[in-house]
């Protein structure tokens, strides 16, 4: 059976609902087994006309990789982060780069709140000590989050979900978006600048994209500007944080704790210094990995591809490089 479209998935699985959406437009869905490298993607696209890449994980989509296939029309992310895609090259080649809308936002927001609660109540430490036979109760003093201020750096889809959840838990919410005036006053107060947000917040949560401007934006100076005994949460991109500076801030006791779902290098070496930091919770980049979110992300990515390939109903809110749509 011949197929008018070929969709390359940079992973070994895709939700059945997403596969059906693509199959219904006549697409041949090709799953990549094993380790996915730029070289393997380039080889796959050079060997057969490929109109779409459904990007699972964060494989590098460079100008050279994209140039191997002149038929490529869309790169659809199974999620939100597109820092591994050369957007200038995609736009030059008139390849749309699209994200999966709000599909993973509820799951990542829940994980953000979970890290905040776990740090405030020392859930990990209490569990370990109790399993070891200790019964630490009389001296325990947890931290309530009601009445505390959470500062959100970035105010996209995920941050807005975090703001709603934090407000429901009685927290005060301040936020700093990419542009002034973009923070919804119904969800958060807008900080005048990053320094004022850091100084006002008991909890700082990162929700910014990774760009050259935001790389290591949380450095020693900005960690020092945070409140004594505050905590840092990062469910965005690991490279937003200078990990050596964070390690020093935790070791000195300036920060009460940190919760990281992502690191600058993944997976980390076992002897990576940040993993030895006190009062640190690290999870393996799984904030969006709920069963429901994985299905939603697959469906939204498939819908994005189907809309581009059939020329019907492209959701411009999901387009990262709208200049690629210009005539």
Image (cartoon, helix red, strand yellow):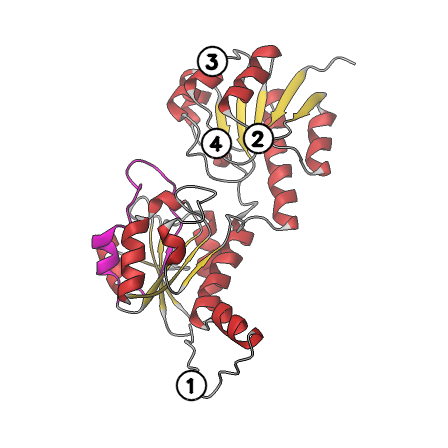
- SS for callout 3: helix
- SS for callout 2: loop
Give percent across and percent down for residue 178: 32, 44
Please tell me whether residue 11 is drawn above or below residue 285 in the rendered image.
above
Quarter containing the N terminus: top right
Q: Name the N-terminal-most of marks 2 and 1.
A: 2
Q: Which residue is mark 3?
A: 67
Q: CA distance from mark 1 to mark 3?
A: 63 Å
Give percent across and percent down for residue 47: 60, 11
Q: Which residue is mark 1?
A: 139
Q: Nearer the viewer, residue 50 or 320?
A: 50
Residue 192 in view in this figure? no
Magenta stretch, residue numbers? 201-227
Q: Locate residue 71 relative to residue 240 in the image: left or right.
A: right
Is 223 magenta? The answer is yes
Quick one: label 2, few (<14), some, or many (20+) residues within 10 Å?
A: few
Give percent across and percent down for residue 246: 31, 55
Quarter containing the C terminus: top left
Using the image, tell me which numbered label, if any, was put on residue 35.
2
Q: Residue furthest right?
A: 1
């Amino acid at each position: 059976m011949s197929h008018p479209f070929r969709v390359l998935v940079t992973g070994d699985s895709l939700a059945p609902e997403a596969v059906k959406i693509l199959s219904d437009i006549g697409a041949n869905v090709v799953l990549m087994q094993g380790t996915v490298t730029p070289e393997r993607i380039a080889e796959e696209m050079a060997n057969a006309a490929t109109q779409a890449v459904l990007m699972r994980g964060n494989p590098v989509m460079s100008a050279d990789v994209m140039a191997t296939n002149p038929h490529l029309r869309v790169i659809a992310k199974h999620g939100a982060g597109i820092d591994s895609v050369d957007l200038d090259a995609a736009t030059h080649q008139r390849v749309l780069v699209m994200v999966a809308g709000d599909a993973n936002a509820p799951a990542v927001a829940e994980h953000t709140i979970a890290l905040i609660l776990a740090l405030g109540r020392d859930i990990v430490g209490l569990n370990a000590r109790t399993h070891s036979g200790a019964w630490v109760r009389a001296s325990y003093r947890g931290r309530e989050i009601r009445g505390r201020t959470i500062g959100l750096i970035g105010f996209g889809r995920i941050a807005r979900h975090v703001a709603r959840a934090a407000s429901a838990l009685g927290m005060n919410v301040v936020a700093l978006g990419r542009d002034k005036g973009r923070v919804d006053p119904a969800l958060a107060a807008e900080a005048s600048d990053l320094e004022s947000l850091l100084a006002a917040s008991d909890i700082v949560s990162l929700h910014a994209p990774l760009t050259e401007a935001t790389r290591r934006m949380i450095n020693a100076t900005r960690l020092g500007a945070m409140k004594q005994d505050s905590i840092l949460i990062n469910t965005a991109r690991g490279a937003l944080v200078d990990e050596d500076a964070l390690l020093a801030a935790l070791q000195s006791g300036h920060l009460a704790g940190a919760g990281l779902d992502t690191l600058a290098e993944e997976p980390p070496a076992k002897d990576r210094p940040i993993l030895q930091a006190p009062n640190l919770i690290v999870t393996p980049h799984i904030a969006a990995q709920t069963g429901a979110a994985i299905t939603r992300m697959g469906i939204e990515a498939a819908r994005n591809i189907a809309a581009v390939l059939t020329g019907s109903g492209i959701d411009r809110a999901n387009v990262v490089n709208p200049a690629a749509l210009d005539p």
